[in-house]
Amino acid sequence: MRIIPAIDIIDGKCVRLSKGDYDTKIIYNENPLEVAKSFEAHGIEYLHLVDLDGAKSSKIVNYKILEQIATQTSLKIDFGGGLKSDDDLRIAFESGANQITGGSIAVKNRAIFEKWISEYGSEKIILGADAKDEKIAVSGWLEDSNEDLVPFIQDYQSKGIEYVICTDIAKDGMLEGPSFDLYGKILAEAKGIKLIASGGISTFDELPKLAELGCEGTIIGKAIYEGRITLKQLENYIIRK
């Protein structure tokens, strides 16, 4: 299972939210590049970079930080937040993203998201399936939709999607443990999907359980920043694999 630390950006700074609520913002570092380099120094190869300003404003905002990290580390970056147009996507890839994650766009403008899948391929486009009570949430989680989580994933699987990041919003940033049952349900019903678990990771012991469940990757945020999981533990886990 791939270990994918998260860096969320507001005003150019590395932050974390609880349950996606912008009012709960905690700034952990003023320099996202510094954080990314510390991940790389511990053998981590992947990074989940989220433009929270972009998610709110419906266009890419923090692409300069993406470019900085992409040019000054060897991390393979998946980038999300505010990608709404062909131009946003072009900027993200030109700034160094290896993959992009589309969440709101996959609900609100299916035609353009399906076009991206066919143009760029399933290796480059990740479906962001963030849910509250198994309903998809959009616009930086500020809006609910009527889309049911598992059918939403299955539908995009039929359109060629391979990678899905699923966040249970109720768990995100709460350090109460991930939604094992929800991920088990997705893996059972959307067979063959490469599921990246996100939200609620709180202890190192949860990682082998997610791997055993069949998750392809896991995104870890606040647990790293709060010292619940150390970079040394992650380094040892990666080496052991």
Image (spheres, rainbow, N blue to C red):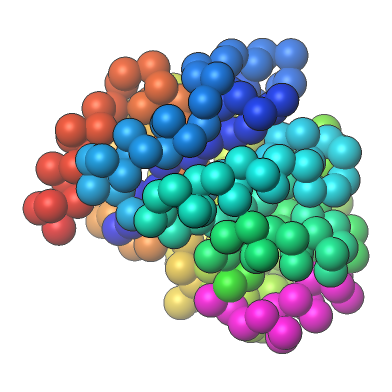
In the foreground, 132 or 114: 114
> Relative to the observer, which residue lies in front, 90 or 117?
90
Residue 110: percent from left, percent from top: 85, 70
Say which of 211 and 72 sits in front: 72
Does 116 lie within the magenta span? yes
Relative side of 116 to 46, left or right: right
- Quarter of the rendering containing residue 99: bottom right
Which range of residues does the magenta coloring cover?
110-123
Residue at screen point 50% across, 19% down: 29
Dominant secondary structure, magenta: helix
Give the quadrant of the N terminus: bottom left
Query: Which residue shows up at 59% across the image and 34% down it?
Result: 8
Q: Is residue 197 visible?
A: no
Q: Is residue 232 left or right of residue 149?
A: left
Q: Is residue 53 magenta?
A: no
Classify residue 7 as left or right of residue 150. left
Relative side of 3 to 230, left or right:
right
> Residue shown at 38%/62% (left/top)?
216
Number of marks in picture: 0
15 or 41, nearer to the observer:
41
Q: Position of residue 42 (x, y in %)?
A: 23, 40
Which residue is farthest left?
A: 240
